[in-house]
Image (tube, rainbow, N blue to C red):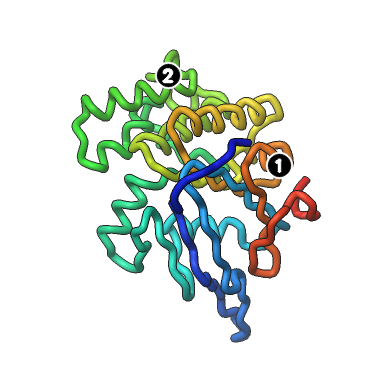
Amino acid sequence: MTKVQGDILLEASDLVKSFVGGDGSELVVLDRLSLKILNHETVAIVGGSGAGKSTLLQILGGLDHPTSGKVLVDGQALGKGKNQNLEWLRNQQIGFVFQFHHLLKDFTALENVMMPSLIAGNSRSISEKRAGELLEQVKLEHRLHHKPAELSGGEQQRVAVARALCNEPKLLLADEPSGNLDSHSTEALHRLLFRLREVNGLAMIIVTHSKKLAAMTDRVLELRDGKLLEDGMESNGIE
């Protein structure tokens, strides 16, 4: 763990997320939930299956919208609908890592990593240079021109992590990042995430069932009954 000081990077206020079932009943997943994340802070979110952890992470990253409430990232609101500010925040300020790597199968590791930079409007030469530097950081400089099918599961996920960092985001959101990996690759990925956090000055929010990964973070929060509770390691929501 690292002692964290600094300004608020992400602030979620009174988030509500509810769904209406086929019988007309309402299922409340998030119930007036609030959260603050500081610059460079790492937070683990734990909880039982179906508690809404992935839903919360998607809302914090602007991939989904709350029923009510608001999210600010670096002082900028994540709005609804076709919103250029939202697109900019997702592309420039927030990096995403999921349980499945979601790499483009017909592209090499280098091409996959440089994609966010190209989307941001950077030249191919600038994008390729940044992607190469990141693949070196994740120790895959010897795999630049390999496609996903030619990589191991751990290597695929390292490419996905490098891609998430391509535009130098301030915040990394990771949803069960090691959920599909064997124990050796899992431990290697966990060490990598926190080394990259130090090198790149990241804040991280990690949804996980891994007690070891959660213990590496500055804070552990449990999502239970639609609310976040401190000291999530003490609950049954983590193994």
Q: Could you tell me residue 151's position as x and y percent?
A: 51, 23
The answer to which image quadrant residue 143 occupies is: top left
Mark 1 burial class by Cα count in 10 Å: few <14, some 14-19, many 20+: some
- In the picture, measured across the screen, residue 77 lies left or right of residue 174, that is left
Q: Is residue 43 left or right of residue 124?
A: right
Q: Position of residue 203 (x, y in %)?
A: 49, 43
Q: Quadrant of the N terminus?
A: top right
Q: Is residue 199 left or right of residue 21?
A: left
Residue at image mark 2: 136
| Amino acid type of the residue tagged 1 in the rendering | Ser
Quadrant for the C terminus in the image: top right
Does dot 2 land on a helix, a strand or a loop? helix
Q: Tell me if mark 2 has few (under 14), some (14-19) or many (20+) residues whose alpha carbon lies within 10 angstroms of its own.
A: some
| Residue 17 coordinates in the image, percent (x, y) | 54, 72
Q: Is residue 76 visible?
A: yes
Q: Tell me where residue 59 appears, x and y as whole percent.
A: 48, 61
Residue at 50% x, 47% y: name it. 173
Name the quadrant containing residue 35. Answer: bottom right
Residue that label 1 marks: 210
In three-dimensional space, the C-alpha distance between marks 2 and 1, rounded to whole angstroms, equals 27 Å
Single out the residue that lies furthest toward the bottom. Answer: 24
What kind of residue is marked 2?
Glu
In this orientation, does residue 50 appear?
no
Taking depth in this image into account, of 224 and 128 the one nearest to the observer is: 224
Image vertical order of residue 183 relative to residue 140, above or below: below
Q: Which residue occupies the foreground of this view, 43 or 130?
A: 43
